[in-house]
Image (cartoon, rainbow, N blue to C red):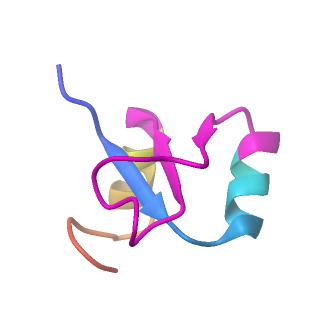
């Protein structure tokens, strides 16, 4: 299977996702750690962003 990740810097979004039951990693190390503060690893979230909100791979 694949691991679909969402990287972002908005602490408000991190709090909203956490309340919704999505685990958000912070602080983090590794890939893009210096560029993005938060990471969510949830395939359903990723697909919802693509299919329902028109986001795409890369910067949006």
Please state, as top left, top right, bottom left or bottom right, where the C terminus lies in the image: bottom left
- Which residue corresponds to the image point at 44% horizontal and 50% vertical from the top-left? 48
Towards the viewer: 42 or 35: 35
**43 in the magenta segment:** yes
- Which residue corresponds to the image point at 33% horizontal and 59% vertical from the top-left? 50
48 vs 10: above or below: above
Q: Which residues are magenta?
A: 18-44
- Which residue corresponds to the image point at 72% horizontal and 66% vertical from the top-left? 11
Towards the viewer: 47 or 23: 23
Q: Is residue 52 visible?
A: no
- Which residue corresponds to the image point at 50% horizontal and 44% vertical from the top-left? 40
Towards the viewer: 10 or 21: 10
Answer left or right for 15 relative to 47.
Answer: right
Answer left or right for 22 relative to 34.
Answer: right
**27 in the magenta segment:** yes
Q: Is residue 54 visible?
A: yes
Q: Count the marks.
A: 0
| Residue 24 drawn at (x, y percent) | 61, 42
| Residue 54 drawn at (x, y percent) | 34, 70
Image-quadrant location for residue 19 = top right
Please state, as top left, top right, bottom left or bottom right, where the N terminus lies in the image: top left
């Amino acid at each position: 299977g694949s691991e679909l990740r969402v990287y972002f810097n908005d602490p408000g979004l991190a709090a909203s996702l956490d309340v919704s039951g999505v685990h958000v990693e912070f602080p983090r190390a590794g890939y893009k750690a210096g560029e993005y503060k938060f990471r969510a690893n949830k395939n359903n979230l990723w697909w919802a962003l693509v299919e329902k909100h028109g986001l795409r791979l890369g910067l949006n």
